[in-house]
Amino acid sequence: MSVSTNEINEIIKICNTIEDSSFWARITKSKLVLIGIYFNITDTMSRLGALHLTQHTGPKHTATVIFFHGSGSSGADMKEWVRLMVKSFSFPHIKVMYPTAPAQPYTPAGGQISNVWLDRAGISPNVPEILDSIANIEVEVKNLIKKEHDSGIPSNRIVVGGFSMGGTLSLHTAYRWDRNLAGAFVFSSFLNSNSIVYNELKNLSGVRLPPLLQLHGNIDELVDLSWGQDTFNVMKSLGVEGDFHILDRLGHSINKRGMILIKDWIEKHLPEI
């Protein structure tokens, strides 16, 4: 019996169209992991799921936003969540991309399979980063950006951003993997206190860094507000310019006010040309 990488990838694509809460989605993904291990096809676990888009509404595409979802979610969920908050998160010249994280074991969930960008030792700033996991997703994110380059969109016309873990990924992307990006926005996110992002920025001097927009609810029950504030303060001390907004009466979520702030900020940093 043999199973090809392409066959498994096709099944993963189908599985990623099913709601994450679905019992059958979880069972199918678990079986796929076992198949991959049995046939030594481990690279399938690092590949992204379904990509969802909001196309530019005008005649010409001159900029791109890549919006990363939080742990256990999907690109489709993130796109719909944003739509519910602001109705129209679209631009005449900007394409918005909502990629889906690879399905992989997630340590804070007891090792269960989940759509996560990277694995963590725990949801806390006081644990070490799992660098191998971060390196795996680096390849995928760089591929996303390269495809935009290939279509004529340079790094300085690309903004990355995300919610929760998606925001953490955006910080690695804009301040480690491509510092020529137009900016990064993060919503309810944080970096570990000994993050490799900080260590790499400490070794830079005289380098222009992308601007940062950070937002956080003041009653966030999962990612404490102080974690986000500490992250922003360290980034600022390392030369990153930006703004931090505290959103009143908001838990671990996005809201309309926050999304309007993000939309206005995107329009400022990715103007029509």
Image (tube, helix red, strand yellow):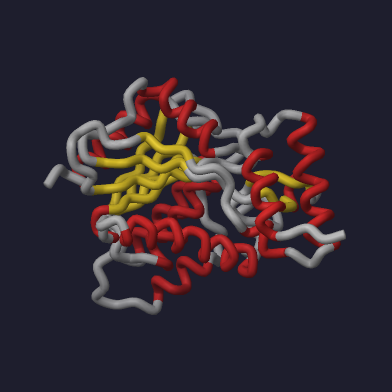
Q: Is residue 40 left or right of residue 189?
A: right
In the image, residue 165 sits, relative to residue 237, either above or below, namely above
Percent across and percent down for residue 112 are 78, 46
At 83% across and 54% down in the image, what residue appears?
Answer: 34
Residue sticking out furthest to the left:
273
At 23% across and 44% down in the image, what residue appears?
Answer: 61
Q: Is residue 10 visible?
A: yes
Percent across and percent down for residue 13 are 62, 44
Q: Is residue 226 visible?
A: no
Q: Is residue 255 left or right of residue 122?
A: left
Q: Is residue 113 left or right of residue 86?
A: right
Circle count: 0
Percent across and percent down for residue 12 are 67, 46
Q: Is residue 181 left or right of residue 47?
A: left
In the image, residue 198 sits, relative to residue 203, either above or below, namely above
In the image, residue 25 sits, relative to residue 230, either above or below, namely above
Q: Nearer the viewer, residue 249 or 184?
A: 184
At 32% across and 50% down in the image, what residue appears?
Answer: 159
Q: Nearer the viewer, residue 201 or 68?
A: 68
In the image, residue 109 sits, relative to residue 44, either above or below, namely above
